[in-house]
Structure formats: C-alpha cells, structure tokens
Image (cartoon, coloured by chain):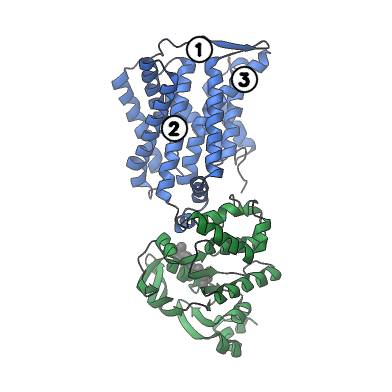
Amino acid sequence: MYYVELLLVGLVWGCTYAMMALGLTLVYGLLRILHVAQATVFTLGAYVGLLVANHTGSLAAAFVAAGLAAGALGPLIYRLVYQPILDKPPFVALVASIGVLIAMEDGFRLVFGPYGLSFAKNTWFTTSLRFGGLSLNLVQIWIAIAAVVLLLLFALFATRTRAGVAWRATVSDPAIAESFGVSVSGVRHLSFFIASVLAGVAGVLVGLLNNLVEPGMGSVISYKGLAIIVLGGLGNVPGTLLASVLLGVVESFGTVYLDKVMDRDAIAFMFLIVVLMIRPQGLLGKAH
Amino acid sequence: MLELKGFACGYGLVQVVEELDLTVPSGRITALLGPNGAGKTSTLMAIAGHVEVQGGQVLFEGEDITRLAPAERTRRGIALAPEGRRIFPDLTVAENLLVGGYTQTAVAARETEARVMALFPRLQERYRQRAGTLSGGEQQMLALGRALMARPKLLLVDELSLGLMPAMVELCFRALVELKVQGLAVLLVEQNTHRALAAADRVAVLVSGRKVYEATGEQARRDPEMVDSFLGLKEMA
Ligand SMILES: Nc1ncnc2c1ncn2[C@@H]1O[C@H](COP(=O)(O)OP(=O)(O)O)[C@@H](O)[C@H]1O
Ligand SMILES: [Mg+2]
C-alpha cells in the first residue's frame, strides 16, 4: 500500500509537470524558444488564484480567474518580448526570457511581499479521501482531475478542430501552412494562450498543494519543465507527457530512497542525465 | 492566365533567374525543363510568393501580383505542389486536405474534396492514415490533392515524378492531363523530360537561369534531340 501511495503521489506531481511542460513543448515546437518565462505565468496564476479564493471563498472562481490572467499574460509576453526578436538566434530569446522571469519575480516581491501567502479557510488539504487503505487528499485528487480534463481538452482541440489541425500543420511546415491561408501569427498567439492557461491553473494547484504562494515558486518547476521537454524529445507532445509522469514517479520514490544523497530537485536532473546517456534523442524523440 | 515579364528572382544578392518571359495559359500544361540548378524551383517558388522576385513582373489574370504574400496568391487561385512534396507527415490525409482548403467554406471544401477523391481514389483508401506512412506516389497525390483543395486556376507542380514508381508516375500524369482538360492552367517543372514532353502543350527550357528554348509541345516532340541537347542529356549518353 505504501508503494501504491508513493506511486499515486508521483503521478499527481507528474500531472502538474505535464501541465507546465506541455506549454513549453508547444512553444518550443513552434518557435524553437525555450520559454523559461513560463514560470512567471505559473506564479501569476497562483497569486491571482489565491487572491480570488481568499476574497470570494470560491475555488472555481479562483481557477477561472487564474486561467484568464495567465492566458492574457502569455500572449502578451510573446507579443512584447519574443515577436520583435524572432529573427535573432535562439539564445537571444532565451536571455530575454530569463530577463522577464527575473523582472517579474521581483515585481511579485514588490507587490505581494517576499514571504509568500497562504490560502485562507481552505478545507481542501485537510480533507482526505480514503479508499481501501489508500489516503489521498482532496487537492491531489483535483490536480489529477484538472490535468486529465485539460489535457483531454487539448487533445480534442488538436485533433478535432480546424484551428487545432491548422496549428499542427504550422508546427510541421509554417511556410506551406501559411500559404494555404493559416494565420501563423494567430497560431503563435493561440499556442501561448493555451500554454499559459495550463501553467496558470497548474500554479493554483501547486499553491494549494503546498499551501504557499511565493514570488520564486515558478523557477524550479519551470527549469524542471525544460528538463522534461528534453527528456520527451524536444517538441514531442506524447514524449513530454510521458516524461512528466515518469519524472513525478521517479521523484516520489527518489525522495524516499535517495533522500540521504540528493534532494528532490536534484533527482530531476540526475534522471535527465541518465536518460540522455541512454537515449540522446529523448524518450520518444526520433533518432537522427 | 499567368504571365512573367522580364522576370528575375533569387536569394538576397544572388540572382538565379533573369530576363524570363513566360506565358502559362489555361487548359494547357506548360512544362519548364532544365538541368539541375537551372532555377526551375526558384521560379516556381517565386510565382507562389516564397522566393523574392528581383525584377520584372508577375501578372495573374491581368493583375500584377509581384508583391503579394503567398496566402493572397492562393486566394486568387494559385496553388503549389512543392518540390519534395512537403505534405504534413504527422497529419492524416483528411487533415492535410483540410489545410489545403483552409480558405474555402465548409460546403465548398466538401465538394472539392469529393472531386479530389474521384481523381485519386487512393487517397480515399488512406483517408484516416498518417500522411507520413504513405508511399511516395500516394504522397505526391496528396500534395496535388491538397493544392487542388484551394480551388486553384493555376497549379504549380515541382518534380511530379521524382522518386516515384513508374505506375505512380503514370497515374499522376494522367491526373494532370485530366485537370488541364477541365480548364486548369498547369505549370510543371520536371526532370523526367520524356514523360513531361509527352504530356506538355508548351515547353520552355531553362539553363543557368536563362530561357534557351521555347516551343509548342508538338514542335518539341518532333525535335527531342534539340531539347536533349539543351538539357545536356546528349553529352551524358
Ligand atoms: N535557399 C537558397 N538560397 C540561396 N541559393 C539557393 C537557394 N535555393 C536554391 N539556390 C540556388 O539557386 C539556383 C537554382 O536552384 P533551383 O531553383 O533549385 O534549381 P532547379 O530547381 O532548376 O534544380 C542553384 O544555384 C541553387 O544553388
Ligand atoms: Mg528543383
């Protein structure tokens, strides 16, 4: 039972990683940009979610508000920061992205204070559900539900809608897709919007999980997200999801069996190094 | 339909085609032949709007389209089946066709798709299959079908037969002939000179970016040695 519980906790973390990493992989697949500033979108989502939850007492309202705020910020970052430098080498966008992350982190510190905020009158973490000797708290269950629902919605969008098909065509061959009338600029904005909504919702969920929202909370998960998209095979969506879940599980067991040797966050990068030694193209990437 | 006047195109400081005059009429197959590196693909891509036009004019239905974006040219009726086919390999056949007809209304797209399927029944069989899993010939059919989904008046085809099995080459050429009978203007770039000559109503030969020969298909077929010598095939034989 203990192992099953570890596995479930790992899956839950894997879900939050997946919500973060999917967006990073979308942006990378389309623009070849390592969108580190996604961490900022995640943190904004967490703050907005927390403020709304504490004001209204409604978590549903908190998720909607966080999704919308994050969904507005992501495309804005694309428009103001990335779009003007698209023709520069990729490291320029990476540097700009890190700049945005640092600036926003200090911005959060100025506005919300350095110490972090907690959710008021939240019964979610104190409520646990038990089934057959397993105990999971309500936040963990919501994370799994939110991740599965959002990822399914995304899959439906990508395969069942005109815009989704156009989006995949653009990833594959932008010039040809555009020549048939697909708006590449529209596709880019849409990708940032989807990536950001996922990140914002993930921000609220992680905030709930730790009952803490603080200015630097996005950094670690964002850097892990980058490790995950490399693991998955850059730009490869199924690979990214698989890598996310695997990393969550590896970390979950690792914190128990390796905690004397390395901390949780080091495990992610150890895992990255080991996988890349065996499969340099990533878990599901195509070999060249 | 399409007219190039004193046309030049290239990449930045490198001009690869100069002083080209060419007319591509409706209901005809115009073949643009020439050795590797002659500038055939560049010309086609410039007509489609992907390569810079560096001089002269591109007229389509009497209007100057020299500076229009590729998508605007597609809207006006120019569609491209590019070199290397460039289908979307991770999309299904159906999805590739959807993108081809992206500017069309749903009703028009359905109607056009039915016509594409009648022309290439193979695509119907492969409808839900990932395009990357198709054979070379099927991919070429898909590239043509995707272009046709845009309801073009002018179809640009680059290397129709390259890398295809002979039976497939035959199917693709028959489709082109059928399309021209329906009134389409076809501009075909080919390295398979003999098959292209057999199908062409007009022939132009490009060598090192300059037009060195132009004739009707009939004339060119009566005089294949002439064409061969321009293509440098004679020396090789
Ligand atoms: N993207 C490019 N940038 C610079 N030069 C190019 C590019 N593509 C083709 N060229 C050059 O243009 C010339 C014509 O090439 P191309 O149009 O592909 O000829 P063809 O299709 O007749 O074989 C060649 O010398 C080629 O090296
Ligand atoms: Mg060529």
Q: Is residue A115 above or below residue B155?
A: above
Q: Residue at x 46, y 69 (%)?
A: B42
| Residue B217 percent across, percent down from the top left | 56, 85
Mark 3, residue position: A8
| Sequence-first disc among 3 and 2 | 3
Q: Quadrant of residue A286?
A: top right
Q: Quadrant of residue B158?
A: bottom right
Tell me the mark number nearer the camera, choosing from 1 and 3: 1
Mark 1, residue position: A125
Seen in the image, is A100 located left or right of residue A195? left
Amino acid marked by disc 3 = Leu
| Residue A265 percent across, percent down from the top left | 52, 23
Q: Which chain is blue?
A: A
Mark 2, residue position: A197
Spatial CA span between label 3 and label 2: 25 Å
Question: How many numbered discs, if any?
Answer: 3
Task: Compare residues A39 and A205 and report the one nearer the observer.
Answer: A205
| Residue B174 percent across, percent down from the top left | 63, 73
Task: Compare residues B46 and B173 and report the one nearer the observer.
Answer: B173
Q: Let me know if residue A105 appears in the view.
A: yes
| Sequence-first disc among 1 and 3 | 3
Q: Residue at x 56, y 36 (%)?
A: A240
Amino acid marked by disc 2 = Val
Parent chain of label 3? A
Q: Colour of chain B?
A: green
Q: Quadrant of the N terminus of chain B?
A: bottom left
